[in-house]
Amino acid sequence: MIQFSFEAPGAGSPWRDTWDKARQVSPTSISEMDLCYKYFGVRAELVVDGVEVISGQGHVTLVDLALSLRHALNRLSSGGDAAIGFTENDEVIRLRRDGDRVVITSSKREWRVSVEREELVGAFIEFLREAHSRLTEFVPGLTDNPVIQGFTPE
């Protein structure tokens, strides 16, 4: 079973500024670099069969994570292995194809979990849809931003 979710920071959190400041600039012209490093901090959590793959304890930027997931999704869908990296730390989550399954490991922690490829792909697609929805509801002009359009699953 896979649980993959994110939570935007609430009022009073310094991370809330990463959302509010995005409303103060032109959404279509926000660069990929700024979207990945300056805006939309969230607590993201990925749990696979009880193993905490991505911890909900710290913050990551949603667009950076979404772009990494989009790349991983493309690699997995084309039959390759993939990885998810983080700007905020040097951990790498490795996704290695093993037949119809994907073996997930961490460069920093001692665990290993295996999941059906289709289930993982489905979880990534749902996460990306939810990220796109939340971002474009919060800043409607982001629907025209090419970076945001780029991580939307077809």
Image (spheres, rainbow, N blue to C red):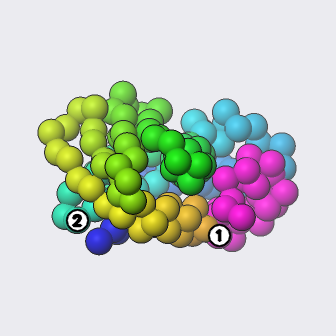
Give the residue pinned by disc 2. Answer: 49
Q: Is residue 45 above or below residue 94?
A: below
Quarter of the image that includes the C terminus: bottom right
Image coords of residue 134 (percent x, y): 61, 68
Disc 2, SS: loop
Give residue 93's mark.
Answer: none
Q: Is residue 133 magenta?
A: yes
Assess disc 2: are there few (<14), some (14-19) or many (≥20) residues with their C-alpha within 10 Å of its C-alpha: few
Q: Residue at 75% across / 37% down in the picture?
A: 31
x then y, percent, for residue 117: 42, 60
Q: Return the x and y of residue 96 as percentages of the image width and height.
A: 37, 43
Q: Is residue 34 above or below residue 9?
A: above
Q: Amino acid at mark 1?
A: Ser
Q: Position of residue 4 (x, y in %)?
A: 39, 64
Q: Amino acid at mark 2?
A: Asp
Query: Where residue 133 is drawn, which disc sits there?
Result: 1
Farthest-out residue, top = 90
71 in relation to 118, above or below: above
**Callout 1 environment at 10 Å: few (<14), some (14 to 19), or many (20+)?**
some
- The residue located at (45%, 41%) in the rendering is 81
Q: Quadrant of residue 125?
A: bottom right
Q: Is residue 88 visible?
A: yes
Badge 2 or badge 1: first in the primary sequence: 2
- Look at the image and give the residue range highlighted in magenta: 132-154
